[in-house]
Amino acid sequence: MSAPDRAIWDDILADVRRRHIGLSRRWFDEIECLGVEAGALWLRVPQNVRRQYLERECAGAFAEAAQNVSGLLLSVRFVGDEAERPSAQRPAARAGATERRPTGPGPAPIPAAPSAAHNGEGAALAEPKPMPRAPAASVLPPQRRADDTLVISPDFTFDNFITGPENRLAHAAAFAVSENPGRAYNPVFLHGGVGLGKTHLLQAICSRVLERQPSAAIHYVSCEAFITQYIDAVQSGEMASFRHRFRDVDVLVIDDIHFLAQRERTQEEFFHTFNSLFQSHKQIVLSSDAPPDQIPDLEERLVSRFKWGLVAELEKPGYETRVAIVKNKAALRGVDMPASVAEMIAQRIDTNIRELEGAIVRAQMLSQVESAPISREMAERILRDAPVRSAPQMTISGIMETVADFYSLKLSDLQGKRRQKSVAQPRQVCMFFGRKYTSLSLEEIGGYFGGRDHTTVMHAVRTIEKRVRANPQLAEQIRTLEDRLLRPSAAG
């Protein structure tokens, strides 16, 4: 590309980044501009997942930017690494393309922008209609293809996933199955709250499998899509086609499998789908907001099968993990984020990763509007009205004092090693409330109770949850304690 063409391409990129903050990614710098041919701007993007992201989300933004810079109405064509020249590429053969490639010579240099394009005077072309602009969302929700297959985002890779004590097991399991589908752990069942990284790991598995085995057949859908397609197949008498779609695959990935609850006929169908895939050594990956045995009205035979492989929880990230996440997300978007600002955001937002990313986007937008670097003062402003906490915050010390007083115990009893029920259960209650009302990880909570590890805390939380359902007296104690803890004086 000549120097003038390079300058114009740089202007197009800058325009996209200025006008479409929510879409922009640092790896846009790696896009290669091949030139203009017959009214189309041709851009080379070797990676399939990135190219699909650009085709799906960014074609309008790049076309708008090309028009702003060149003054011409140009469509945009994204091609893969196999195309040396646009004339060698057939866009109609690519996924999602609907037009034939215009005939003509190879790519011409990008036309220089006429002065009228910038001052609005004497434009030779008819006034263009404004292009629809994508919102600057904090996180791009999964988009759907026509067959309800969820689209893989280039943001969600293993390289971009920040590990910590809260998600290390889930990450290790996901990576293992992506390296050896159907053999390492089968199924893999990931569970945790909203915005904690389940979808990231599901998509990272898909991306990694396709990277290692480009011909692999992967079906990645939401549980709602599975249910809808099953109902449609029953009503239309096309069950054979439905079963082929879900059973003749190498990897089946289903998000939010807890939506199977209370759907007996769909559970029956999924039971047979599961068995077919498992017996063929095909990988099954599921995600849910709860572990298998806590999904209401889920058949026991499905609960049992979901636990055959590996069940891993993704917890709310601790402070250090949140700082690393903010830095990573900022770098992905090409945002120059000072360490002190990243730490402030991580300190103030402890709900989930989506809220962290939303703060990054707001800081990026404010920085651009004010033409100033991101600062602590700027971060204070964008965090002022941020939904920073979803529940009243407490300290472990405050929880322990309230529980010790309620059960007439000493703090040293809760922190010690005594295992009598009169002490063990109140200790588990403390851990239960610590998990529910603090931003600490399981490992950090365990540190307050004689250095107990995260598995002990996890067991304590689940034990209290089960006993509350079966023991009305304990349920009443939990309600009373919760009322006391939610008073401002109990916050610690």
Image (cartoon, helix red, strand yellow):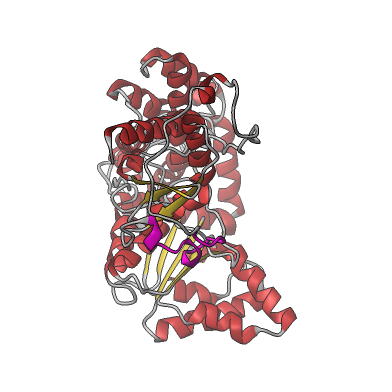
Q: Nearer the viewer, residue 463 or 165?
A: 165
Q: Position of residue 490 (x, y in %)?
A: 50, 25
Q: How many marks?
A: 0
Residue in the image at 56% along x and 53% along y: 468
Q: Which span of residues is magenta-colored?
A: 86-101
Could you tell whether 417 is left or right of 257 in the image? left
Residue 191 forms part of the magenta stretch: no
Compared with 250, 413 (above or below) is above
Residue shown at 36% from the left, 82% from the top: 281
Question: Toward the viewer: 34 or 358?
Answer: 34
Name the dominant secondary structure of the magenta segment: loop
Q: Is residue 228 above or below residue 242?
A: above
* For residue 472, side relative to residue 75 (left or right): right
Q: Using the rendered image of the protein, determine whether residue 323 is visible from the camera's viewpoint.
A: no
Q: Quadrant of the C terminus?
A: top left
Q: Residue 243's quadrant in the figure?
A: bottom right
Asked if residue 120 can be seen in this view, the reply is yes
